[in-house]
Amino acid sequence: MRCGWQLSDVPYKLSWGALFAFIKHLGSDSAHYRFKNPEYAAWTGPELVPNLLAGLLDATNILIWQNSKAGQRGRDRPKPIKRPWSKDNTDRIGRGAIPMDQWDAWWGDGSPNVVTE
């Protein structure tokens, strides 16, 4: 537990009443609070502030863009702030299908790589 107690300490070092009072007043970052209040679980914890700030910055960037010439023409829409849990979709390999005459050079001819002199 947070304060270094164990359940075996009850009732010898810690009374049942003290244990219940401790549990009742656990903070909003505890697993007990998230279990008892699942509707508020997403609004607690250390990731809340950066997530809210990133959303606020995204909304501000869109608002500024909408009032610009590029926004009025529908071009150069700002990209949202990258969240740590989002997938990075920027990795691309090639631009399309490889023509058949270039396939063997790209993939290899299928034979083992043997060096001959």
Image: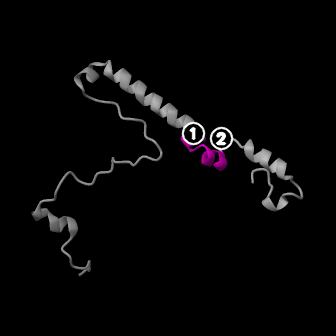
Between 4 and 39, the residue placed more toward the observer is 39
* Residue type of the residue flagged with mark 1: Tyr
Report the residue at 31% width, 19% height from top. Answer: 68
Q: Residue 8 sits in which quadrant?
A: bottom right
Query: What is the span of residues highlighted in magenta in the rendered image?
Result: 30-45
Report the residue at 51% width, 37% height from top. Answer: 51
* Quarter the C terminus occupies: bottom left
Between 42 and 48, the residue placed more toward the observer is 42
Q: Earlier in the sequence, mark 2 or mark 1?
A: 2
| Position of residue 49 measured from the top left corner of the image (x, y, whole percent) | 56, 34
* Residue type of the residue flagged with mark 2: Ser
> Vertical placement of 8 versus 114: above or below?
above
Instruction: In the displayed orientation, state which residue is furthest to the right.
Output: 12
Q: Is residue 37 magenta?
A: yes
Element carrying mark 1: helix
| Position of residue 61 measured from the top left corner of the image (x, y, whole percent) | 39, 26
Q: Which residue is mark 1?
A: 40
Specify few, some or many for label 1: CA neighbours under 10 Å numbering under 14, 14-19, or 20 or more. few
